[in-house]
Image (cartoon, rainbow, N blue to C red):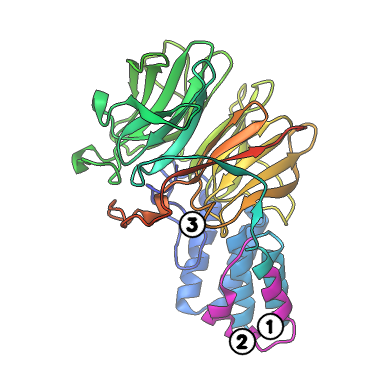
């Protein structure tokens, strides 16, 4: 979940705001703000120095490296600007450098053509999967997907319609929950607990949802449904109602513990079976924009995708947080959905250009990223993808969600002929 928040972005002209209420990593955010201020004032030397400090503190990120190219170009260092653009291209992402006025001085240079070719190659389609099914409601704004192995059906949440849809093996869709029933707002995360036959879901009051009441803004809750009947068993409101919340993404442990991220406050919470309130795992302000959590095989660590910074790891015994180190040619930012499969992570990235699904290869201790490979990258088949679910050796993911049609005021652009929500599948077996 990430379309409903004011995200901390590291792009030009978007200075960082304080994260949540806890402040979080204030030092690097201060450098980010200083860099944006320097750029706006035309102080490109300070702009560069702040970006370099930022990069030393939090590592290589696409926006940092691209902006370093801008800084060098503005300072008249064309060769160095091209070097940074090549580093940026090596991350597998794209920016329209050809139309960027900040880079006008490097376009006549001999090495510019090579850089543009590298950038263009990152837009080439990669398609290893196939269509699994489409959903009939083009305006549902599909967010998350889970699988009920007992009844052989998928469960897909709808932010717009405020419900959850069940899709059977023939692709036929019916309501699992009715729109707005049980005082729900937009429906976000869904996760099946097969042992306890529970469907966990999250709901949040956002303007994309039909019937949105601004008075509810900032409210969010964790919901427990009977997987067989769809009856609501429990509702747990987000803590600290004086602060805004979006309980957006989650996972469930083998013991039934729910781990849920709060994309607005930057906290991660837990709920043990039978709990009546969320417990704080890490406090507000810990993350800029936490997304999907994923447990390690021994369930002693929790990987947390953060939209602005990459992937963090929480030690569940000490609650210590560290950021997963990775090579400079791997970018983990813009990850919405995150899933552990064997000794790897699958990341659904809708905050990169192009949008894509990547397999992240880790070392044997799962403490460091070694490499990453793109599994899917092709428009219109992959357009604002969000989340997925493993079913056996196959990864099913929402490849076309409808979020790209949502305006800032929550209204939707009229649907086109190919705007029905789309779920794709990628066969991953054998898998390490």
In terms of secondary structure, where does tag 3 sit? loop
Q: Distance between the residues labelled 3 and 2?
A: 26 Å
Using the rendered image of the protein, determine whether residue 262 is visible from the camera's viewpoint.
no
Residue position for label 1: 78
Residue that sits furthest to the right in the current view: 364
**Quadrant in which residue 50 is drawn:** bottom right
Instruction: Determine whether, in the image, residue 274 is placed left or right of residue 336.
Output: left
Q: Distance between the residues labelled 1 and 3?
A: 26 Å
| Percent x, y of residue 285 | 46, 40
The numbered mark, 3 or 2, whose residue comes first in the sequence reads 3
Instruction: Determine whether, in the image, residue 154 is placed left or right of residue 160.
Output: right
Residue position for label 2: 105
In terms of secondary structure, where does tag 2 sit? helix
In terms of secondary structure, where does tag 1 sit? helix
Instruction: Say if 303 sits above or below 57 in the image.
Output: above
Rate crowding at label 2 as few (under 14), some (14 to 19) or many (20 or more) other CA atoms within 10 Å.
some
Task: Name which residue lies at 52% across and 47% down.
Answer: 307
Tags 1 and 2 touching, CB below 8 Å? yes
| Percent x, y of residue 336 | 52, 43
Using the rendered image of the protein, determine whether residue 119 is visible from the camera's viewpoint.
yes
**Which disc is residue 9 wearing?**
3
**Quadrant in which residue 126 is drawn:** bottom right
Instruction: Determine whether, in the image, residue 302 is placed left or right of residue 187.
Output: right
| Percent x, y of residue 2 | 44, 46
Task: Name which residue lies at 58% across and 79% down.
Answer: 98
Q: How far apart are marks 1 and 2 (CA)?
A: 7 Å
Q: What stretch is highlighted in magenta?
A: 93-119
Give the quadrant of the N terminus. top left
* Residue 115 within the magenta-colored segment of the rendering: yes
The numbered mark, 1 or 3, whose residue comes first in the sequence reads 3
Task: Name which residue lies at 64% across and 78% down.
Answer: 72
């Amino acid at each position: 979940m990430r379309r409903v928040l004011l995200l901390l972005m590291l792009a030009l002209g978007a200075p960082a705001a304080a994260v949540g209420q806890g402040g979080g990593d204030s030092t690097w955010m201060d450098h980010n703000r200083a860099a944006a201020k320097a750029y706006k004032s035309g102080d490109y030397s300070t702009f560069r120095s702040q970006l370099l400090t930022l990069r030393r503190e939090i590592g290589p990120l696409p926006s940092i490296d691209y902006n370093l190219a801008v800084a060098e170009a503005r300072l008249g260092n064309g060769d160095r600007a091209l070097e940074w653009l090549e580093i940026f291209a090596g991350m597998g992402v794209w920016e329209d450098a050809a139309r960027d006025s900040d880079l006008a001085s490097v376009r006549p240079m001999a090495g510019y053509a090579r850089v543009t070719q590298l950038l263009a190659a990152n837009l080439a389609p990669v398609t290893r999967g196939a269509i699994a099914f489409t959903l009939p409601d083009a305006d549902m704004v599909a967010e998350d997907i889970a699988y009920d192995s007992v009844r052989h059906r998928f469960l897909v949440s709808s932010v717009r319609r405020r419900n959850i849809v069940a899709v059977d093996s023939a692709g036929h869709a019916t309501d699992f929950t009715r729109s707005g029933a049980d005082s729900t707002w937009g429906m976000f995360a869904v996760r099946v607990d097969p042992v306890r036959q529970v469907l966990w879901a999250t709901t949040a009051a956002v303007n994309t949802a039909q019937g949105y009441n601004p008075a509810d803004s900032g409210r969010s809750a964790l919901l427990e449904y009977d997987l067989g009947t769809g009856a609501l068993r429990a509702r747990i409101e987000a803590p600290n109602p004086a602060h805004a919340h979006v309980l957006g993404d989650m996972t469930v442990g083998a013991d039934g513990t729910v781990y849920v991220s709060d994309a607005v406050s930057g906290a991660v919470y837990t709920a043990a079976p039978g709990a009546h309130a969320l417990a704080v795992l890490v406090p507000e302000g810990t993350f800029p924009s936490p997304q999907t959590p994923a447990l390690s095989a021994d369930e002693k660590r929790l990987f947390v995708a953060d939209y602005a910074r990459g992937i963090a790891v929480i030690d569940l015994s000490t609650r210590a947080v560290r950021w997963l180190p990775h090579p400079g040619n791997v970018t983990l930012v813009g990850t919405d959905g995150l899933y552990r499969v064997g000794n790897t992570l699958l990341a659904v990235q809708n905050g990169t250009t192009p949008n894509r699904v990547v397999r992240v290869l880790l070392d044997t201790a799962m403490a460091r990223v070694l490499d990453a490979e793109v599994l899917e990258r092709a428009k219109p088949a992959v357009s604002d993808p969000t989340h997925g679910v493993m079913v056996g050796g196959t990864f099913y993911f929402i490849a076309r969600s409808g979020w790209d049609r949502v305006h800032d005021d929550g209204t939707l652009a009229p649907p086109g002929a190919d705007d029905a929500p789309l779920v794709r599948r990628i066969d991953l077996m054998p898998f390490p």
